[in-house]
């Protein structure tokens, strides 16, 4: 059986060295999980993009050095907000629109999660440290292999995917809803503020309540976003491997389902 084909945009248009360093990790994780990555350039001819999207069963939205333009979610620019990447934004929006229209699985990572949330009419915290006063090392990058814990909602789809790798600890929040810990890497200074339509919180950072994962609520449409970078830890982290496997499995399962003609924003 052919491998599921996964559309993945080049992460960043304004720094070729960054893009060439970051992209191979996503491609390797997709391949090792059983998928076939299809790289989408950030200036594709419309007919080429349409042809590539038609041939893909899923969409992976990677991280980026950019920040989303705050105008997209009705906010003034924070001094620490990085410049946007309009070429990446344009391609991402086309990929996500196609995925929602055709119910293609979406796996969004870091910046990809933030883009997905804003596309679904959500908003962002533009700088966690200055706006939250948080000392959790969210922006640790590659300096820390494991930066902090996230608390995964035990009732979430995310918990079903990584459940066997969660620590068997009591809830880390008093409400008892979000609690089973998972240790993750971290490389971001922005985060979800208001959750977008058709999305729900699947994990938070228990110390400062920063949202760390979202998942879709539309029945029959596999949508998951994580704020950390499982592609960086794929080789030696079973939970990261489980995330990519679940995504590829969802893409493979989509082939057997009747496909909608269109579904707008669901």
Image (spheres, rainbow, N blue to C red):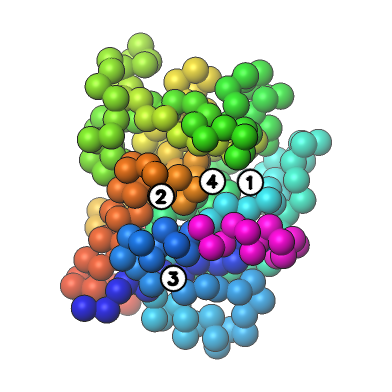
| Residue 108, percent from left and from top | 46, 52
Q: Spatial distance from mark 3 to mark 1, Cα to Cα?
A: 30 Å
**Disc 4 marks which residue?**
110
Mark in front: 2 vs 1: 2
Asked whether the residues under the numbered discs 4 and 3 touch, taking CB atoms below 8 Å apart as contact, a structural biologist would say no
Asked whether residue 236 is drawn in magenta, I would say no
- The quarter in which the C terminus is drawn is bottom left
User: Between disc 4 and disc 2, whose residue precedes?
Assistant: 4
Look at the picture and state if 39 lies above or below 219: below
- Residue 7 shown left or right of residue 88 in the figure: left
Residue, disc 1: 73
Disc 2/disc 1 C-alpha distance (Å): 36 Å
Is residue 36 left or right of 46 when viewed as pictured?
Answer: left
CA gap between label 3 and label 2 equals: 18 Å
Of all residues shown, which one is farthest toward the front?
Answer: 236
Mark-to-mark CA distance, 4 and 3: 19 Å
Q: Position of residue 188 (x, y in %)?
A: 61, 38
Residue 230's label in the rendered image is none
Res 37 label: 3
Q: Which residues are magenta?
A: 13-25
- Name the N-terminal-most of marks 1 and 4: 1
Return the residue nearer the eye: 91 or 137.
137
The residue at the far top in this view is 174
Among numbered discs 3 and 1, the one appearing first in the sequence: 3
Q: Nearer the viewer, mark 3 or mark 1?
A: 3
């Amino acid at each position: 059986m052919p491998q599921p084909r996964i559309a993945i945009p080049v992460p960043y248009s304004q720094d070729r060295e960054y893009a060439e360093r970051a992209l191979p990790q996503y491609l390797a994780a997709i391949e090792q999980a059983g998928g076939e990555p299809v790289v989408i350039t950030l200036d594709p001819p419309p007919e080429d993009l349409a042809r590539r999207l038609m041939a893909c069963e899923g969409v992976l939205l990677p991280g980026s050095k950019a920040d989303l333009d705050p105008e997209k979610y009705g906010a003034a620019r924070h001094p620490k907000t990085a410049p946007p990447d309009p070429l990446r934004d344009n391609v991402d929006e086309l990929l996500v629109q196609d995925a929602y229209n055709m119910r293609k699985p979406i796996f969004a990572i870091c910046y990809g999660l933030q883009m997905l949330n804003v596309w679904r009419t959500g908003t962002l915290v533009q700088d966690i440290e200055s706006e939250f006063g948080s000392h959790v090392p969210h922006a640790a990058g590659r300096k820390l292999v494991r930066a902090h814990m996230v608390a995964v909602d035990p009732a979430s789809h995310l918990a079903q995917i990584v459940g066997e790798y969660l620590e068997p600890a009591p809830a880390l929040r008093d409400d008892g809803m979000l609690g089973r810990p998972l240790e993750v890497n971290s490389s971001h200074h922005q985060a979800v503020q208001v959750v977008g339509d058709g999305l729900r919180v699947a994990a938070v950072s228990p110390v400062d309540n920063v949202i760390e994962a979202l998942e879709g609520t539309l029945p029959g449409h596999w949508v998951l976003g994580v704020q950390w970078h499982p592609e960086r830890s794929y080789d030696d982290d079973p939970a990261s491997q489980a995330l990519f496997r679940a995504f590829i499995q969802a893409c493979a399962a989509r082939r057997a389902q009747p496909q909608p003609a269109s579904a707008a924003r669901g």
